[in-house]
Amino acid sequence: MSELIQAILNSEEKNDLRAFISELRQQEKNYLLRNDILNVYGEYCSKSQKPETFYKFSNLGKLIYYTQEIIQEDSNFCFIIRPKIADQEVYRLTADLDVESMTVEELLDLRDRLVNKFHPNDGDLLELDFGPFYDYTPTIRDPKNIGKGVQFLNRYLSSKLFQDPKQWLESLFNFLRLHNYNGIQLLINYQIQSQQQLSQQVKKALNFVSDRPNDEPYEQFRLQLQTMGFEPGWGNTASRVRDSLNILDELIDSPDPQTLEAFISRVPMIFRIVLVSAHGWFGQEGVLGRPDTGGQVVYVLDQAKNLEKQLQEDVILAGLDGLNVQPKVIILSRLIPNSDGTLCNQRLEKVHGTENAWILRVPLREFNPNMTQNWISRFEFWPYLETFAVDSERELLAEFQGRPDLIVGNYTDGNLVAFLLARRMKVTQCNIAHALEKSKYLFSNLYWQDLEDKYHFSLQFTADLISMNAANFVVSSTYQEIVGTPDSVGQYESYKCFTMPELYHVVNGIELFSPKFNVVPPGVNENSYFPFTRTEDRVENDRDRLAEMLFTLEDSSQIFGKLDDPTKRPIFSMARLDRIKNLTGLAECFGQSKELQEHCNLILVAGKLRVEESGDNEERDEIVKLYHIIDEYNLHGKIRWLGVRLSKNDSGEIYRVIADHQGIFVQPALFEAFGLTILESMVSGLPTFATQFGGPLEIIQDKVNGFYINPTNLEETATKIIDFVTKCEQNPNYWNTISQQAIDRVYSTYTWKIHTTKLLTLARIYGFWNFTSKENREDLLRYLESLFYLIYKPRAQQLLEQHKYR
Ligand code: UDP
Ligand code: LCN
C-alpha cells in the first residue's frame, strides 16, 4: 500500500489527495468508517466533476477502496487500510502530506486518545498478544484457504510425520491401542505388541477376510479376528472390515494425507458429545422469538438430532451395535425455575425423535433468587458461568458415566463454559460463535465503558478471546464469519487488534490463518421445512388454519391489523424483535413506497405486541417504533403483525402458505451472522430478499436463487422488490424459476447430513492430531487461565454484586 500512496504523491493525484483531505477536515466527525469515507469521496468526485473512471480506477480511488477507517487527530490523518482479506496497514498522513507507517500499538494509543482515555505512561496498560502461542503451529498462507483448516493440517502434519516412518508407525500404533467403549477394548488388543506386529497382523487379517463373502456379518468371524489381535470397530461386514484394513495397510506402507483422513474418519472414537448452549430459553416448544432465543436453539437442537443419527450410523458401520454401544448427545443448558410455561424448569428432557439425545438443565447456584430463578439476558449472564461449569461437570460425568469425547460450545457464554469443562475434563473443545457481538455493535470496544452498564462487553470480549484461542477447532457457518469479504472485516477478524481503553490493548487477539478454523454451515430441519409444492406432505387443516391466521383472523390478543385486500401478494418476514433484525426498517421501507403498498401487503411474525409483556430493552424499543411507523405512514389495512409463538410445524407451514400466495420473504437485518430463516424460506420455495451484510451473502447467489438488499437503503430495497413483483406480474414463470432455484440451493449445500459428517470428521482428526503431535498448548492455556482469573473473574464478581441489588 505504501507504493500506492507514493504513486499518488508523485503524480497529479497529489492535488486530489490534498483536496480530499480538505473535505475530510470539514466533516463533523473525526472518526470515519468505510461508508462515511466512500460518501465523502463520492461527493468530492462529483463536486470536482471527476469522470467515473477516476472514481474507480485512479490510485486515489484504489486507496479509498481499501481504506476501512480514517481518524483525524489535530492536523494529521490516520488511514487504516485493509489491502487484502485479514491484513491491515496503518499510515499517518501529516498536513504536509508526509506519510509514515504506524504500528498497531500507536494505532491503539491514538484510538484511546480519541476518547480521552490515553495512558501517557508507556507500560501502564495490559497488552494482550496471542501471536507467540501460534508460532509453533503451522499457518495457512493463502487467505482463500482460510476456513479449510483440517485439509491443510492434514497435509502439513502428514508430511512431517511421514518423514520419519519409525516415529509415524509408533504414533499410529499407540493411537490404535487407545480406544475403548465403557471399558470394552476396540480395534486392537494386547496380542499386538509392536508396530511391526501390527503391520504383519494387518496383512494376515486381510488375507483372512478377503476369502469371505462381502456381506458376511462381522459377528460370524469376530472370534477369528480377535485371535489375530483385532477387536470390534473395523466394520460390520466382511467387505467393510476389508476396506478398513486395506486403508490401514496402505497407511502403514505408503502413507498419504487422503488415506490418513479416510482412515481416521472411520475410527470409532466419538460416542458422547456435549453441546453447551447456556443462556436463553432452551426448549423444544414455545421458546422461539424470545429475546436471546432464536437460531442458536434451532441449530443446536437440529445438530443434536443429526449428530445422534450420524453416530448411530457410524456405530453400525463400525460393527459395534452388537456391543450395546449407544451414542449419547447432551445439550447442556441452564435450568430456569420460573419458566413461563416452557419446560425450561425441567432437569432432563428427551430430544424429540431421538433415542439418546437429551437436554440437561443445570440450575445456577442461588446467588440471588431474583436473578437466578428467572431468565437472565445474555448480556448479564457472566457471573454465573464458572460455578455453572463446575456443577455441570459433576452432572455430565453422572449422565455419561464417564467423560464425554467432544465438547462443543455455542455463543460466548457456552464457549467459555466449554473451555472450563474441556480444561477440567481434558476433552477436545470446539467453538461455535453463532454471532460475535463485537462487530454487531458499532464501536462496541472503543466505547465499552459507556456501554458497560447495558452490555458488559468487557466480560464478553474477554470471554471470546479466551475461548476462541483455547478451542482445538472452531466451526464457522461462513467464510466471512472468519475474515469478512474484500471490503468488510470478518467477525473473528475484528478480534485481531482492538483497544478496550483503560482495560487492555489487544495487539494480536487471534491467528486468522490458523488451521483451527473450519467452515461447516448448518442445514435446515427437512421434516418441518420443505417445498410448498410437496402437497402430499402438507396437512390441509394446518394450511387453512395458518392462512386464516396470516391474512384474515381477528384476534387482537395476538394479531395486529386487518388487511383491506388480503389477496395482494404478501411480503413476509419473521424474526426476533431486536434492533439488529431491523423489522422496523422493513416496515419503514414499505411505508415509504406507495408503489409497494399498491402491489403487496406486509406480514410480520415478530415477538410480542405489547411493551408491558416484554422484559427486554431492545424489544420494548422496537415495539414502540413499529407502532410509530405504522401510524406515521398510515399502514393500517396494509400490514399484519402477528405476535405469536409458533410450533415447529406451524413455522414450517407458514412459509409454505406464503408461497401458495406467490409471496416473498424479506430478511432486512442490519447484520446477520448466518440467518436460518433464509434457509427456511428458500427451501420452502420463497423468493428471498436478504441483507447483504453478513452470512446471506454466501447463502444466496444474487438474482439466481434470491436477492441481496441493502437494508440501510430503503428506496433501493423497495425498487428491487417492485422490480421483482413487476417481472412476476408480466411473466408468472419468473416467480417459479427463482423459487425452484432457491430450493435447489439449500438441498445442494445446506443439509444437516453434510454438516454432521464434516463435524465428526473434524472432531476425529483434531483428536488424532492432538494425540500424535503432542502439541504443547499448556503455555497458551495457562495464559488464558490467567486472563480468566485476573480479568474476567473480578469483573464478573463486580457484576454479581450489582445483581444483588436487583
Ligand atoms: N423464529 C421463530 N419464531 C419467531 C422468530 C424466529 O420460530 O418469532 C425462528 C426462525 O424460524 C428461525 C430462528 O427462530 O429458525 C431464527 O434464526 P436466525 O438464524 O434467522 O436468527 P437468530 O434469531 O438466531 O438471530
Ligand atoms: C445467531 C444468529 O444471529 C444467526 O445469524 C444464526 O443463523 C444463528 O445464530 C444460528 O447460527
Image (cartoon, rainbow, N blue to C red):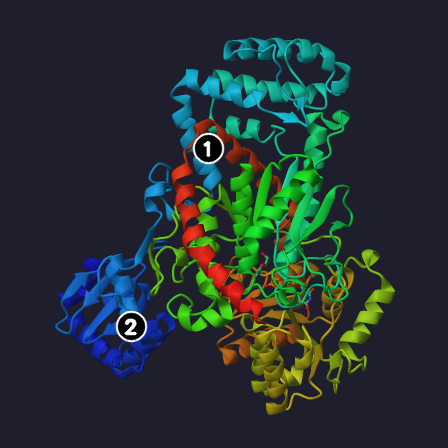
Distance from mark 2 CB to nearest ligand 2 atom below 8 Å? no
Q: Position of residue 432 (x, y in %)?
A: 54, 51
- Left or right of 383 on screen, residue 660: right
Q: Earlier in the sequence, mark 2 or mark 1?
A: 2
Q: Position of residue 200 (x, y in %)?
A: 55, 8
From the image, which quarter does the N terminus lie in?
Answer: bottom left
Q: Position of residue 595 (x, y in %)?
A: 60, 85
Pointers 2 and 1 in contact (C-beta within 8 Å): no
Viewer-proximal residue, 528 or 364? 364
From the image, which quarter does the C terminus lie in?
Answer: bottom right
Res. 601 in view: no
Numbered disc 1: secondary structure: helix
Q: For ligand 2, which image quadrant applies?
A: bottom right
> Which label belongs to residue 336?
none
Label total for image: 2
Q: Relative to residue 365, is residue 581 depicted above or below?
A: below
* Residue at x 61%, y 29% (from the top left corner): 266
Q: Residues within 10 Å of mark 2 (few under 14, many from 20)?
A: some
Q: Which residue is mark 1?
A: 154
Q: Relative to residue 364, is residue 16 depicted above or below?
A: below
Q: Relative to residue 728, is residue 702 depicted above or below?
A: above
* Residue at x 40%, y 62% (from the top left corner): 488
Res. 293 in view: yes
* Residue at x 52%, y 18% (from the top left corner): 173
Numbered disc 2: secondary structure: helix
> Which label belongs to residue 114?
2
Amino acid type, residue under disc 2 in the picture? Leu
Instruction: Report, in whole angstroms, how far the alpha carbon at label 2 lies from the one at label 1.
Output: 45 Å
Viewer-proximal residue, 399 or 544? 399
- Left or right of 60 on screen, residue 646: right
Amino acid type, residue under disc 1 in the picture? Asn
